[in-house]
Image (spheres, rainbow, N blue to C red):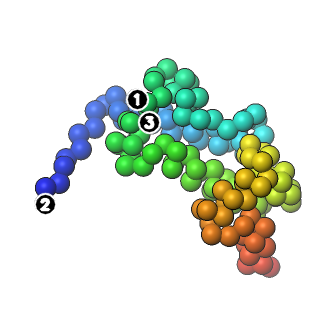
Amino acid sequence: METQTLTVSHRQREIVKEYLAQLDKHIHDLRTGLAERTHEIRDFADLMHIHPTHLSNTISQVLRKSPCDIYEQKLMDLAKELLISSNRSIAQIARQLDFDPSNFTKFFKVFEGTTPKKFREAALSLKN
Protein backbone atom coordinates (compact mmCIF):
# COMPACT_ATOMS: atom_id res chain seq x y z
CA MET A 1 0.00 0.00 0.00
CA GLU A 2 1.41 3.36 -1.02
CA THR A 3 1.33 6.31 1.31
CA GLN A 4 1.09 9.78 -0.07
CA THR A 5 3.51 12.37 1.16
CA LEU A 6 1.82 15.63 1.98
CA THR A 7 3.80 18.65 0.89
CA VAL A 8 2.62 21.73 2.71
CA SER A 9 3.63 25.10 1.32
CA HIS A 10 4.64 28.07 3.40
CA ARG A 11 1.44 29.84 2.31
CA GLN A 12 -0.71 26.90 3.43
CA ARG A 13 0.96 27.01 6.85
CA GLU A 14 0.26 30.76 7.02
CA ILE A 15 -3.41 30.19 6.18
CA VAL A 16 -3.78 27.50 8.85
CA LYS A 17 -2.01 29.62 11.44
CA GLU A 18 -4.19 32.64 10.65
CA TYR A 19 -7.40 30.58 10.67
CA LEU A 20 -6.57 29.09 14.07
CA ALA A 21 -5.70 32.55 15.45
CA GLN A 22 -8.96 34.03 14.12
CA LEU A 23 -10.88 31.06 15.49
CA ASP A 24 -9.29 31.45 18.94
CA LYS A 25 -10.14 35.17 18.92
CA HIS A 26 -13.73 34.40 17.96
CA ILE A 27 -14.05 31.77 20.71
CA HIS A 28 -12.65 34.31 23.18
CA ASP A 29 -15.24 36.84 21.97
CA LEU A 30 -18.00 34.26 22.46
CA ARG A 31 -16.68 33.48 25.96
CA THR A 32 -16.67 37.14 26.97
CA GLY A 33 -19.95 38.03 25.26
CA LEU A 34 -18.32 40.29 22.64
CA ALA A 35 -19.48 38.23 19.65
CA GLU A 36 -22.96 38.96 18.38
CA ARG A 37 -23.17 35.71 16.41
CA THR A 38 -21.12 32.67 15.56
CA HIS A 39 -18.91 32.84 12.49
CA GLU A 40 -19.22 30.68 9.42
CA ILE A 41 -16.35 29.69 7.14
CA ARG A 42 -17.09 32.64 4.86
CA ASP A 43 -16.70 35.04 7.81
CA PHE A 44 -13.25 33.68 8.56
CA ALA A 45 -12.37 33.75 4.86
CA ASP A 46 -13.50 37.39 4.63
CA LEU A 47 -11.31 38.29 7.60
CA MET A 48 -8.38 36.58 5.89
CA HIS A 49 -9.16 38.01 2.42
CA ILE A 50 -9.32 34.60 0.74
CA HIS A 51 -12.05 32.54 -0.87
CA PRO A 52 -14.05 30.31 1.54
CA THR A 53 -13.45 27.23 -0.62
CA HIS A 54 -9.71 27.86 -0.63
CA LEU A 55 -9.73 28.25 3.15
CA SER A 56 -11.76 25.10 3.67
CA ASN A 57 -9.65 23.04 1.26
CA THR A 58 -6.38 24.26 2.77
CA ILE A 59 -7.45 23.54 6.36
CA SER A 60 -8.74 20.10 5.40
CA GLN A 61 -5.60 19.21 3.47
CA VAL A 62 -3.12 20.41 6.08
CA LEU A 63 -4.88 19.43 9.31
CA ARG A 64 -6.83 16.43 7.96
CA LYS A 65 -9.94 17.87 9.65
CA SER A 66 -12.55 20.17 8.23
CA PRO A 67 -12.71 23.73 9.55
CA CYS A 68 -16.23 22.91 10.72
CA ASP A 69 -14.97 19.98 12.81
CA ILE A 70 -12.29 22.15 14.41
CA TYR A 71 -14.76 24.96 15.08
CA GLU A 72 -17.38 22.64 16.57
CA GLN A 73 -14.79 21.02 18.87
CA LYS A 74 -13.68 24.42 20.17
CA LEU A 75 -17.32 25.44 20.58
CA MET A 76 -17.98 22.27 22.58
CA ASP A 77 -14.94 22.92 24.76
CA LEU A 78 -16.26 26.41 25.47
CA ALA A 79 -19.78 25.11 26.14
CA LYS A 80 -18.44 22.60 28.66
CA GLU A 81 -16.29 25.27 30.29
CA LEU A 82 -19.28 27.61 30.65
CA LEU A 83 -21.54 24.86 31.98
CA ILE A 84 -19.02 23.99 34.68
CA SER A 85 -17.74 27.46 35.61
CA SER A 86 -20.89 29.55 35.29
CA ASN A 87 -24.13 29.72 37.25
CA ARG A 88 -25.93 30.92 34.12
CA SER A 89 -28.85 28.87 32.88
CA ILE A 90 -28.35 26.46 30.00
CA ALA A 91 -30.63 28.64 27.88
CA GLN A 92 -28.46 31.71 28.61
CA ILE A 93 -25.30 29.79 27.71
CA ALA A 94 -26.98 28.56 24.52
CA ARG A 95 -27.86 32.11 23.52
CA GLN A 96 -24.35 33.32 24.36
CA LEU A 97 -23.07 30.73 21.89
CA ASP A 98 -25.68 31.85 19.33
CA PHE A 99 -27.87 28.74 19.65
CA ASP A 100 -31.57 28.33 20.12
CA PRO A 101 -31.68 26.44 23.47
CA SER A 102 -33.30 23.32 21.98
CA ASN A 103 -30.76 23.21 19.14
CA PHE A 104 -27.96 23.65 21.67
CA THR A 105 -29.15 20.60 23.58
CA LYS A 106 -29.23 18.54 20.37
CA PHE A 107 -25.79 19.82 19.30
CA PHE A 108 -24.33 19.09 22.73
CA LYS A 109 -25.84 15.61 22.91
CA VAL A 110 -24.40 14.64 19.50
CA PHE A 111 -20.88 15.48 20.71
CA GLU A 112 -21.05 14.44 24.36
CA GLY A 113 -23.67 11.71 24.34
CA THR A 114 -25.54 13.48 27.11
CA THR A 115 -27.55 16.65 27.60
CA PRO A 116 -25.99 19.88 28.89
CA LYS A 117 -28.02 19.54 32.09
CA LYS A 118 -26.78 16.01 32.81
CA PHE A 119 -23.22 17.03 31.89
CA ARG A 120 -23.36 19.96 34.33
CA GLU A 121 -24.83 17.82 37.12
CA ALA A 122 -22.17 15.14 36.64
CA ALA A 123 -19.33 17.66 36.51
CA LEU A 124 -20.55 19.50 39.60
CA SER A 125 -21.03 16.26 41.55
CA LEU A 126 -17.36 15.43 40.86
CA LYS A 127 -16.32 18.82 42.29
CA ASN A 128 -18.14 18.22 45.56
Q: Position of residue 86 (x, y in %)?
A: 81, 58
Of callouts 2 and 3, the N-terminal one: 2
The answer, for residue 2, to whether it is visible in the render is: yes
Task: Provide the secondary structure element on which disc 2 rests.
Answer: loop
Asked whether disc 2 touches disc 3, contact meaning CB atoms under 8 Å apart, the reply is: no
Q: Does 82 sit above or below residue 113? A: above
The answer, for residue 124, to whether it is visible in the render is: no
Amino acid type assigned to the residue bearing label 2 in the image: Met
Count neighbours of disc 3 (C-alpha within 10 A) and say few if under 14, some if 14 to 19, many if 20 or more. many
Asked whether disc 3 touches disc 1, contact meaning CB atoms under 8 Å apart, the reply is: yes
Amino acid type assigned to the residue bearing label 3 in the image: Ser
- Name the residue: 37% across, 49% down: 64
- Name the residue: 31% across, 31% down: 10
Of callouts 1 and 2, the N-terminal one: 2
**Residue 56 numbered tag:** 3
Task: Provide the secondary structure element on which disc 3 rests.
Answer: helix
User: Horizontal placement of 14 versus 29: left or right?
Assistant: left
Judging by the rendered image, the residue that carries numbered circle 2 is 1
Tell me the CA gap for discs 1 and 2. 30 Å
Judging by the rendered image, the residue that carries numbered circle 1 is 54
- Name the residue: 78% across, 67% down: 117
Q: Position of residue 47 (x, y in %)?
A: 56, 24
Task: Provide the secondary structure element on which disc 1 rests.
Answer: helix
Q: Position of residue 112 (x, y in %)?
A: 62, 66
User: Horizontal placement of 82 versus 11: left or right?
Assistant: right
User: Horizontal placement of 109 versus 16: left or right?
Assistant: right
Q: Does 81 sit above or below residue 20? A: below
User: Horizontal placement of 15 versus 29: left or right?
Assistant: left
Image quarter hosting the N terminus: bottom left
